[in-house]
Amino acid sequence: MMSLSSKKDLPIGIFDSGIGGLTVLKALRQQLPHEHFLYLGDTARLPYGTKSPDTVKNYALNANEILAQQVKMLVIACNTATAVALEALQERFFPIPVVGVIEPGAQAALNEPNPGPVVVLATEGTVKGHAYRQVLARLSPQTPVIEWPCSLLVAIAEEGWCHGYLVEEIITKLLAPLRLQLGEQKPSCVVLGCTHFPVLKEPMQKIWGDIPVLDPAYRVAQEVTALLKQQDLERQSHDEATIHFMATDGIERFARVAQIFLGHPIAQHCVELVSVPAYESRARQEINSRTAASK
Ligand code: DGL
Protein backbone atom coordinates (compact mmCIF):
# COMPACT_ATOMS: atom_id res chain seq x y z
CA MET A 1 0.00 0.00 0.00
CA MET A 2 1.15 3.56 -0.75
CA SER A 3 2.53 5.51 2.23
CA LEU A 4 0.85 8.79 3.14
CA SER A 5 3.96 10.80 2.23
CA SER A 6 4.15 9.31 -1.26
CA LYS A 7 0.42 9.87 -1.70
CA LYS A 8 0.91 13.54 -0.77
CA ASP A 9 3.52 13.74 -3.51
CA LEU A 10 1.09 12.65 -6.24
CA PRO A 11 -0.16 15.29 -8.67
CA ILE A 12 -3.60 16.92 -8.66
CA GLY A 13 -5.49 15.82 -11.78
CA ILE A 14 -7.29 18.47 -13.83
CA PHE A 15 -9.80 17.48 -16.45
CA ASP A 16 -11.55 19.37 -19.25
CA SER A 17 -12.93 18.58 -22.68
CA GLY A 18 -10.13 20.70 -24.16
CA ILE A 19 -7.92 23.58 -23.15
CA GLY A 20 -10.54 25.53 -21.17
CA GLY A 21 -9.50 23.86 -17.92
CA LEU A 22 -6.12 25.58 -18.27
CA THR A 23 -7.81 28.71 -16.89
CA VAL A 24 -8.41 26.68 -13.72
CA LEU A 25 -4.88 25.24 -13.79
CA LYS A 26 -3.51 28.80 -13.92
CA ALA A 27 -5.40 29.77 -10.76
CA LEU A 28 -4.41 26.52 -9.03
CA ARG A 29 -0.71 27.03 -9.78
CA GLN A 30 -0.82 30.53 -8.40
CA GLN A 31 -2.43 29.31 -5.21
CA LEU A 32 -0.53 26.02 -4.88
CA PRO A 33 2.95 26.54 -6.36
CA HIS A 34 4.40 23.42 -4.66
CA GLU A 35 1.83 20.95 -6.01
CA HIS A 36 2.39 18.75 -9.07
CA PHE A 37 -0.37 18.88 -11.70
CA LEU A 38 -1.47 16.43 -14.35
CA TYR A 39 -3.81 17.90 -16.96
CA LEU A 40 -6.01 15.98 -19.37
CA GLY A 41 -7.91 17.60 -22.24
CA ASP A 42 -10.28 15.28 -24.08
CA THR A 43 -9.62 17.13 -27.32
CA ALA A 44 -10.63 14.15 -29.49
CA ARG A 45 -14.22 14.51 -28.31
CA LEU A 46 -14.50 18.25 -27.76
CA PRO A 47 -16.95 19.99 -27.61
CA TYR A 48 -18.88 18.50 -24.71
CA GLY A 49 -21.23 21.47 -24.45
CA THR A 50 -23.44 20.56 -27.40
CA LYS A 51 -23.66 16.81 -26.64
CA SER A 52 -26.30 14.90 -24.67
CA PRO A 53 -25.90 14.44 -20.89
CA ASP A 54 -25.49 10.67 -21.34
CA THR A 55 -22.66 11.09 -23.81
CA VAL A 56 -20.88 13.71 -21.70
CA LYS A 57 -21.21 11.55 -18.60
CA ASN A 58 -19.69 8.58 -20.34
CA TYR A 59 -16.90 10.62 -21.93
CA ALA A 60 -16.05 12.12 -18.53
CA LEU A 61 -16.14 8.78 -16.69
CA ASN A 62 -13.93 7.12 -19.26
CA ALA A 63 -11.41 9.89 -19.69
CA ASN A 64 -10.97 10.29 -15.94
CA GLU A 65 -9.95 6.63 -15.60
CA ILE A 66 -6.60 7.74 -17.04
CA LEU A 67 -6.16 10.50 -14.47
CA ALA A 68 -7.56 8.63 -11.47
CA GLN A 69 -4.77 6.04 -11.59
CA GLN A 70 -2.13 8.72 -11.08
CA VAL A 71 -3.51 11.50 -8.85
CA LYS A 72 -4.45 12.30 -5.24
CA MET A 73 -7.36 14.55 -6.18
CA LEU A 74 -9.43 15.27 -9.29
CA VAL A 75 -10.59 18.72 -10.37
CA ILE A 76 -13.31 18.60 -13.01
CA ALA A 77 -12.39 21.89 -14.68
CA CYS A 78 -15.34 21.67 -17.04
CA ASN A 79 -18.76 23.05 -16.16
CA THR A 80 -20.54 20.80 -18.63
CA ALA A 81 -18.98 17.64 -17.16
CA THR A 82 -19.49 18.93 -13.62
CA ALA A 83 -23.16 19.60 -14.40
CA VAL A 84 -23.96 16.08 -15.56
CA ALA A 85 -21.28 13.84 -14.11
CA LEU A 86 -19.91 15.17 -10.80
CA GLU A 87 -21.80 12.71 -8.60
CA ALA A 88 -21.05 9.78 -10.89
CA LEU A 89 -17.35 10.72 -10.91
CA GLN A 90 -17.27 11.04 -7.10
CA GLU A 91 -18.89 7.64 -6.78
CA ARG A 92 -16.67 5.92 -9.36
CA PHE A 93 -13.37 7.26 -8.05
CA PHE A 94 -14.02 7.23 -4.30
CA PRO A 95 -11.94 7.66 -2.08
CA ILE A 96 -10.17 10.15 -4.41
CA PRO A 97 -11.77 13.56 -3.72
CA VAL A 98 -13.43 14.96 -6.87
CA VAL A 99 -14.06 18.72 -7.03
CA GLY A 100 -16.35 20.41 -9.56
CA VAL A 101 -16.50 24.02 -10.73
CA ILE A 102 -20.19 24.92 -10.47
CA GLU A 103 -20.59 25.34 -6.72
CA PRO A 104 -17.49 27.62 -6.50
CA GLY A 105 -18.91 29.60 -9.45
CA ALA A 106 -22.23 30.05 -7.66
CA GLN A 107 -20.44 31.09 -4.47
CA ALA A 108 -18.38 33.66 -6.37
CA ALA A 109 -21.65 35.15 -7.70
CA LEU A 110 -23.19 35.32 -4.22
CA ASN A 111 -20.17 37.27 -3.00
CA GLU A 112 -21.19 40.17 -5.22
CA PRO A 113 -23.12 42.71 -3.18
CA ASN A 114 -25.14 44.30 -6.04
CA PRO A 115 -28.87 43.63 -6.42
CA GLY A 116 -30.25 42.11 -9.63
CA PRO A 117 -30.17 38.70 -11.26
CA VAL A 118 -27.05 36.56 -11.58
CA VAL A 119 -26.35 36.01 -15.28
CA VAL A 120 -24.56 32.74 -16.09
CA LEU A 121 -22.96 32.32 -19.52
CA ALA A 122 -22.33 28.66 -20.24
CA THR A 123 -22.54 25.91 -22.83
CA GLU A 124 -25.87 24.65 -24.09
CA GLY A 125 -25.46 21.47 -21.99
CA THR A 126 -24.82 23.34 -18.74
CA VAL A 127 -27.73 25.71 -19.40
CA LYS A 128 -30.18 22.92 -20.35
CA GLY A 129 -29.39 21.02 -17.14
CA HIS A 130 -29.92 24.21 -15.03
CA ALA A 131 -26.99 23.23 -12.83
CA TYR A 132 -26.27 26.83 -11.76
CA ARG A 133 -29.93 27.55 -11.07
CA GLN A 134 -30.13 24.47 -8.84
CA VAL A 135 -27.01 25.26 -6.84
CA LEU A 136 -27.96 28.93 -6.46
CA ALA A 137 -31.50 27.95 -5.39
CA ARG A 138 -29.96 25.84 -2.64
CA LEU A 139 -27.43 28.46 -1.50
CA SER A 140 -29.63 31.54 -1.88
CA PRO A 141 -33.25 30.78 -2.86
CA GLN A 142 -34.20 34.45 -3.33
CA THR A 143 -31.49 35.15 -5.94
CA PRO A 144 -32.86 35.31 -9.51
CA VAL A 145 -30.74 33.51 -12.11
CA ILE A 146 -30.60 33.80 -15.88
CA GLU A 147 -28.63 31.08 -17.67
CA TRP A 148 -27.61 31.86 -21.23
CA PRO A 149 -26.09 29.45 -23.80
CA CYS A 150 -22.95 30.56 -25.65
CA SER A 151 -21.50 27.27 -26.99
CA LEU A 152 -20.00 29.04 -30.00
CA LEU A 153 -17.51 30.81 -27.73
CA VAL A 154 -15.86 27.47 -26.95
CA ALA A 155 -14.72 27.16 -30.59
CA ILE A 156 -13.48 30.75 -30.59
CA ALA A 157 -11.49 30.19 -27.40
CA GLU A 158 -10.05 26.90 -28.74
CA GLU A 159 -8.84 28.90 -31.77
CA GLY A 160 -7.00 31.17 -29.37
CA TRP A 161 -9.08 34.19 -30.45
CA CYS A 162 -9.29 36.22 -27.26
CA HIS A 163 -9.40 39.86 -28.32
CA GLY A 164 -10.28 42.15 -31.17
CA TYR A 165 -13.13 43.63 -33.06
CA LEU A 166 -14.44 40.39 -34.56
CA VAL A 167 -14.54 38.62 -31.18
CA GLU A 168 -16.40 41.57 -29.64
CA GLU A 169 -18.88 41.54 -32.52
CA ILE A 170 -19.58 37.82 -32.09
CA ILE A 171 -20.08 38.12 -28.34
CA THR A 172 -22.30 41.20 -28.78
CA LYS A 173 -24.45 39.32 -31.29
CA LEU A 174 -24.71 36.22 -29.10
CA LEU A 175 -25.74 38.31 -26.10
CA ALA A 176 -28.13 40.68 -27.93
CA PRO A 177 -31.31 38.67 -27.11
CA LEU A 178 -30.22 38.42 -23.47
CA ARG A 179 -29.64 42.19 -23.27
CA LEU A 180 -33.08 42.68 -24.79
CA GLN A 181 -34.61 40.33 -22.21
CA LEU A 182 -32.85 42.18 -19.40
CA GLY A 183 -34.10 45.58 -20.58
CA GLU A 184 -33.49 48.13 -17.80
CA GLN A 185 -32.68 45.38 -15.29
CA LYS A 186 -29.01 45.45 -14.27
CA PRO A 187 -27.47 42.06 -13.38
CA SER A 188 -25.58 41.80 -10.11
CA CYS A 189 -22.79 40.00 -11.97
CA VAL A 190 -22.01 37.82 -14.97
CA VAL A 191 -20.53 34.39 -14.20
CA LEU A 192 -18.28 32.82 -16.83
CA GLY A 193 -19.86 29.39 -16.42
CA CYS A 194 -17.60 27.64 -18.91
CA THR A 195 -13.88 27.28 -18.27
CA HIS A 196 -13.11 28.34 -21.84
CA PHE A 197 -14.65 31.78 -21.35
CA PRO A 198 -12.15 33.49 -18.99
CA VAL A 199 -9.78 34.01 -21.94
CA LEU A 200 -12.56 36.19 -23.37
CA LYS A 201 -12.88 38.23 -20.19
CA GLU A 202 -11.49 41.40 -21.70
CA PRO A 203 -14.06 41.70 -24.55
CA MET A 204 -16.76 40.46 -22.16
CA GLN A 205 -15.99 43.16 -19.62
CA LYS A 206 -16.01 45.77 -22.37
CA ILE A 207 -19.51 44.67 -23.33
CA TRP A 208 -20.87 44.47 -19.75
CA GLY A 209 -19.32 47.78 -18.64
CA ASP A 210 -19.28 48.17 -14.86
CA ILE A 211 -21.11 44.89 -14.18
CA PRO A 212 -18.57 42.45 -12.64
CA VAL A 213 -17.64 39.59 -14.96
CA LEU A 214 -16.52 36.67 -12.77
CA ASP A 215 -14.05 33.89 -13.48
CA PRO A 216 -14.80 31.22 -10.82
CA ALA A 217 -11.29 29.69 -11.11
CA TYR A 218 -9.99 31.53 -8.04
CA ARG A 219 -12.84 30.13 -5.92
CA VAL A 220 -12.11 26.65 -7.27
CA ALA A 221 -8.47 27.06 -6.24
CA GLN A 222 -9.56 28.12 -2.74
CA GLU A 223 -11.79 25.07 -2.43
CA VAL A 224 -9.01 22.73 -3.60
CA THR A 225 -6.58 24.32 -1.12
CA ALA A 226 -9.03 23.86 1.76
CA LEU A 227 -9.74 20.26 0.80
CA LEU A 228 -6.03 19.36 0.54
CA LYS A 229 -5.56 20.70 4.05
CA GLN A 230 -8.67 19.02 5.42
CA GLN A 231 -7.70 15.63 3.99
CA ASP A 232 -4.04 16.01 4.95
CA LEU A 233 -2.96 15.71 1.30
CA GLU A 234 -0.74 18.79 0.91
CA ARG A 235 2.63 18.09 -0.72
CA GLN A 236 5.37 18.52 1.88
CA SER A 237 8.37 18.98 -0.41
CA HIS A 238 9.17 22.43 -1.74
CA ASP A 239 11.29 21.05 -4.59
CA GLU A 240 10.21 22.28 -7.97
CA ALA A 241 6.71 21.16 -8.88
CA THR A 242 5.93 19.70 -12.31
CA ILE A 243 3.05 19.99 -14.75
CA HIS A 244 2.39 17.27 -17.25
CA PHE A 245 -0.14 17.66 -20.05
CA MET A 246 -2.14 14.95 -21.80
CA ALA A 247 -4.59 15.27 -24.68
CA THR A 248 -6.61 12.72 -26.61
CA ASP A 249 -5.91 14.39 -29.98
CA GLY A 250 -4.03 17.23 -31.69
CA ILE A 251 -1.10 17.65 -29.31
CA GLU A 252 0.63 20.16 -31.60
CA ARG A 253 -2.47 22.34 -31.57
CA PHE A 254 -2.90 21.83 -27.83
CA ALA A 255 0.65 23.10 -27.15
CA ARG A 256 0.19 26.07 -29.48
CA VAL A 257 -3.11 27.31 -28.05
CA ALA A 258 -2.34 26.35 -24.45
CA GLN A 259 0.35 29.00 -24.27
CA ILE A 260 -2.27 31.68 -24.94
CA PHE A 261 -4.29 30.36 -22.01
CA LEU A 262 -1.34 29.92 -19.65
CA GLY A 263 0.65 32.98 -20.65
CA HIS A 264 3.89 31.07 -21.32
CA PRO A 265 5.07 28.66 -24.03
CA ILE A 266 4.66 24.89 -23.74
CA ALA A 267 6.96 22.64 -25.73
CA GLN A 268 5.10 20.09 -27.80
CA HIS A 269 7.07 17.26 -26.18
CA CYS A 270 5.48 18.23 -22.83
CA VAL A 271 2.09 17.17 -24.18
CA GLU A 272 1.45 13.44 -24.28
CA LEU A 273 -1.05 11.89 -26.66
CA VAL A 274 -3.27 9.42 -24.78
CA SER A 275 -6.20 7.33 -25.88
CA VAL A 276 -9.33 6.56 -23.93
CA PRO A 277 -10.20 2.96 -24.76
CA ALA A 278 -13.51 1.20 -24.39
CA TYR A 279 -15.72 4.25 -24.41
CA GLU A 280 -17.68 3.44 -27.50
CA SER A 281 -18.96 0.04 -26.53
CA ARG A 282 -19.72 0.82 -22.89
CA ALA A 283 -21.44 4.15 -23.54
CA ARG A 284 -23.47 2.82 -26.44
CA GLN A 285 -24.51 -0.22 -24.46
CA GLU A 286 -25.72 1.94 -21.56
CA ILE A 287 -27.59 4.39 -23.79
CA ASN A 288 -29.16 1.61 -25.88
CA SER A 289 -30.33 -0.40 -22.89
CA ARG A 290 -31.87 2.72 -21.30
CA THR A 291 -33.65 3.59 -24.55
CA ALA A 292 -34.92 0.00 -24.86
CA ALA A 293 -36.17 0.03 -21.25
CA SER A 294 -38.13 3.25 -21.76
CA LYS A 295 -39.97 1.88 -24.84
N1 DGL B 1 -14.87 23.96 -20.87
C1 DGL B 1 -16.14 23.29 -20.84
C2 DGL B 1 -17.05 23.88 -19.77
O1 DGL B 1 -16.57 24.46 -18.80
C3 DGL B 1 -16.93 23.17 -22.10
C4 DGL B 1 -16.33 23.14 -23.40
C5 DGL B 1 -17.02 22.19 -24.36
O2 DGL B 1 -18.10 22.50 -24.88
O3 DGL B 1 -16.46 21.13 -24.54
O4 DGL B 1 -18.24 23.76 -19.84
Image: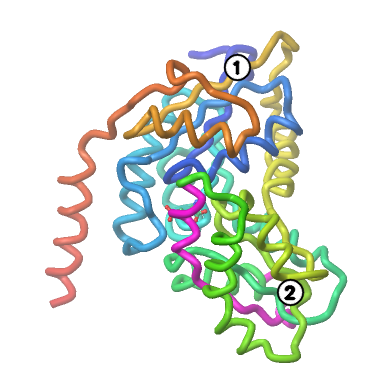
Where's the C terminus, which quadrant?
bottom left
Image location (x, y in percent) of residue 107: 73, 61
Q: Is residue 116 above or below residue 9?
A: below
Q: Is residue 80 above or below residue 120?
A: above
Q: Earlier in the sequence, mark 1 or mark 2?
A: 2
Residue kind at label 1, given as amino acid type:
Thr
The residue positioned 46% from the left and 47% from the top of the image is 158
Disc ID at residue 242: 1
Residue furthest right in the image: 113
Could you say which is closer to the camera, residue 264 or residue 8? 264
Would residue 202 appear left or right of 48 to someone viewing this image?
Answer: right
Give the residue at mark 2: 140
Residue kind at label 2, given as amino acid type:
Ser
Report how far apart the C-alphas of labels 1 and 2 lie in the structure: 39 Å
Could you say which is closer to the camera, residue 186 or residue 14? 186
Would residue 131 appear left or right of 293 to someone viewing this image?
Answer: right
Image location (x, y in percent) of residue 43: 37, 41
Residue 240's image quarter? Answer: top right
The mark closer to the camera, 1 or 2, is 1
Q: Is residue 218 above or below residue 184?
A: above
Would residue 27 appear left or right of 288 to someone viewing this image?
Answer: right
Would residue 247 appear left or right of 120 to someone viewing this image?
Answer: left
Image location (x, y in percent) of residue 54: 31, 60
The residue positioned 43% from the left and 16% from the top of the image is 269
Image location (x, y in percent) of residue 132: 59, 68
Q: Which residues are magenta?
A: 138-158
Q: Residues within 10 Å of mark 1 (few under 14, many from 20)?
A: few
